[in-house]
Amino acid sequence: MSIHDSPIAYSVVVPLYNERESVPQLYVKIIDVMDTLEGRYEIVFVDDGSKDGTFRLLSEIAADDQRVVVVRLRRNFGQTAALKAGFDHSRGGIIISMDGDLQHDPAEIPRFIEKIGEGYDIVSGWRVERTDAWLTRQLPSRVANWIMAKLSRVELHDFGTTFKAYRREILSEIHLYGELHRFIPALASWAGASVAEVPITNIRRQSGKSNYGISRTIRVLLDLLSVKFLLDYSTRPLQFFGAVGLLCLTGGFGIGFWVFARKAFLDEGILANHGPLIILGTALVMGGIMFISIGLIGELLSRTYYESQNKPVYTVREFIGRGRAGEGRTEPPRTAGAGR
């Protein structure tokens, strides 16, 4: 077997959105590092609907370097979908993801691979010293990371960074949407994956404009709730909604019995003396019934979800590289949903 026929050991996945100024330097830095490693590698650039000429530049690079693959999405789907596209179209046994704005140093990739070699399934970067704005980026990030660590029981300091390394088989079991790419360690840990982290340098952005803001922080905090539900109750929603429903029913019936006892033994006027309490008890009973009903419906939806086929979170406009393997393919192959 020639070196060109040997399996690809590493895939470097880089989502890009309007990063034309960063691409040439990033490409050179990545190949300089990857050329020092043993084993074949590929670089998968995902153009997430850029409008500044990023795709044209990536096309030129792919034409000159067969190790480069370019996936162009039809529009801007967001970072999670772009990463999923890169993961789906990569072939390496170890997949390294990183941002395309030069805030991640490719020279640190060997540290991730070394940690994977110690037996870990996921290695996450930890920006020990942040260089971004304290109020709008660092403070919300610290709060979100602390909450996420407590909810997921995965002791990471930095869930938010894209700079991570994964074993391929781990990613094949995880479905990404929303802002869930930052929570892959938590989702994978629930399935039994081992997670470690390595300190990384947080480089100040050199060119272009950041696509992050306080609005994304709000979306991430909302996703925390969904991740917690996915981790603990995705396969048993009735246990969550049913518990709340039973609590409401207990409170409602308790109020009802108390009001009935006051009427039966003390001959008190129900509506005159306890009108608001009766309304509260009725609302609790109805709420309890609704929560239990939602839990039952959730059980049915959960069964449907885990037994049905997956629905892609993106559509690909063009696929460049890898010769005949990518010809005519505009969407990734569909795979059957994993049974639980």
Image (spheres, rainbow, N blue to C red):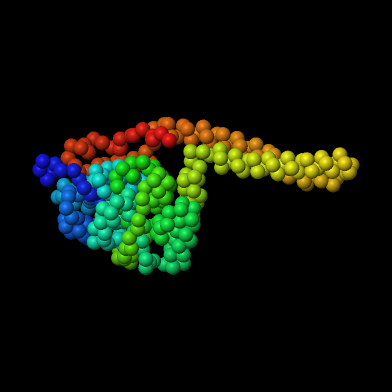
Q: Is residue 93 left or right of residue 291?
A: left
Write down the quadrant of residue 329 in the picture.
top left
- 334 is higher (above) or lower (below) than 69: above
Residue 172 lies left or right of residue 228; in this view the side is: left
Across and down, in percent, residue 94 comes to 26, 48
Question: In the image, is 321 to the left or to the right of 276?
Answer: left
Question: Relative to 99, is 264 above or below?
Answer: above
Front-most of 189 and 216?
A: 189
Location of residue 50 in the rendering, given as x and y in whole percent from the top left corner: 31, 51
Quadrant for the N terminus, please: top left
Q: For the point 60% across and 35% down, which residue is it?
A: 293
Across and down, in percent, residue 103 comes to 31, 62
Q: Name the one closer to the observer, 315 or 143.
A: 143
Q: Can residue 148 be seen at all in this image of the molecule?
A: no
Compared to 49, does 107 lie above or below?
below
Residue farthest toward the front in the current orientation of the protein? 118
Whether residue 108 is visible here, answered yes or no, is yes
Image quadrant occupied by the C terminus:
top left
